[in-house]
Image: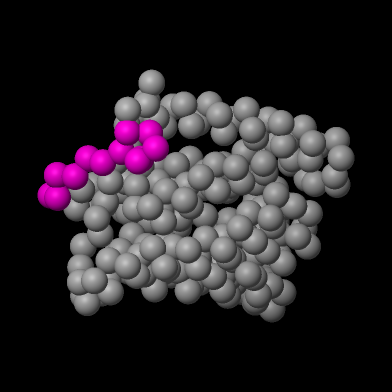
């Protein structure tokens, strides 16, 4: 028992606190996003700034680049979500959630897979990146999923469940334990977010398509 306590104590003494802060802010982001609060975006901005540095340090270069992109999307997302709140002057007003057709998502997923393969090949052959293909796949799909969050598209949560499950393996391999725990929490919150947004969507009976892809062929 004493050995176990000493082991736990030693672990927390060596715990990378910068990563822990980034993890806690990321949890705040997904919970606030699931609840529809625009304050999820400031939490995202700070956490992604920290993770940009953390992932670069362990040579997950695509993840580092992804978090730099998240910084910009945090600003864009806050602006997008503020429009409705400012008009209604009610921070707790329900989100206007939309759903895009399955056929549209399939086409996008195929295009993203081809893009990820190409980028993964470049990262594998022309950079010191670790896990270049898996890292690139999670990054490419996360870029798209973040856009869906900002646009309040219901299916974003389904993308995140798959992305987060793949990322768990990646971070275990890189010994990023707090971040692994974070992504396990992400999977749970993504399930909650999908359930909550689905209820709001069904209640509002909105079924809009992307303006440029109103009738995808």
Which quadrant: the C terminus?
Answer: top left
Q: Name the quadrant of the N terminus.
A: bottom right
Q: Position of residue 178 (x, y in %)?
A: 59, 64
Residue in the picture at 42% in, 68% down = 78
Vertical side of 36 occupied by 135: above or below: above
Q: What residue is at 62 percent from the left and 28 percent from the top?
A: 114
Above or below for 22 versus 157: below
Q: Which residue is painted at 72% across and 37% down in the image?
A: 119
Question: Seen in the image, is 19 located left or right of residue 98?
Answer: right
Front position in the image: 28 or 173: 28
Residue 206 lies within the magenta run: yes
Residue at 65% x, 75% y: name it. Answer: 18
Q: Tell me if residue 165 comes above or below residue 182 in the rendering.
A: above
Q: Is residue 156 left or right of residue 142?
A: left
- Give, as a single range, the part of the protein colored magenta: 202-214
Q: Write down the quadrant of residue 101 in the picture.
A: top left
Residue 103: x %, y % from top left:
37, 25
């Amino acid at each position: 028992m004493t050995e176990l306590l000493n082991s736990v104590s030693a672990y927390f003494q060596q715990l990378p606190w910068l990563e822990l802060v980034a993890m806690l802010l990321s949890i705040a982001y997904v919970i606030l996003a699931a609840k529809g609060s625009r304050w999820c975006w400031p939490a995202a901005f700070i956490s992604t700034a920290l993770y940009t540095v953390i992932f670069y340090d362990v040579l997950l270069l695509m993840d580092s680049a992804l978090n730099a992109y998240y910084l910009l999307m945090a600003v864009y997302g806050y602006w997008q979500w503020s429009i409705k709140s400012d008009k209604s002057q009610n921070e707790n007003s329900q989100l206007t959630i939309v759903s895009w057709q399955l056929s549209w998502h399939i086409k996008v997923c195929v295009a993203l897979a081809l893009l990820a393969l190409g980028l993964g090949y470049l990262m594998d052959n022309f950079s010191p990146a670790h896990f270049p293909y898996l890292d690139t796949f999670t990054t490419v799909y996360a870029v798209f999923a973040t856009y869906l969050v900002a646009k309040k598209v219901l299916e974003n949560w389904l993308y995140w469940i798959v992305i987060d499950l793949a990322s768990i393996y990646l971070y275990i391999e890189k010994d990023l334990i707090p971040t692994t725990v974070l992504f396990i929490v992400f999977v749970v919150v993504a399930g909650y977010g999908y359930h909550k947004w689905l209820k709001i969507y069904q209640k509002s009976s909105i079924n809009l398509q992307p303006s440029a892809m109103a009738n995808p062929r």
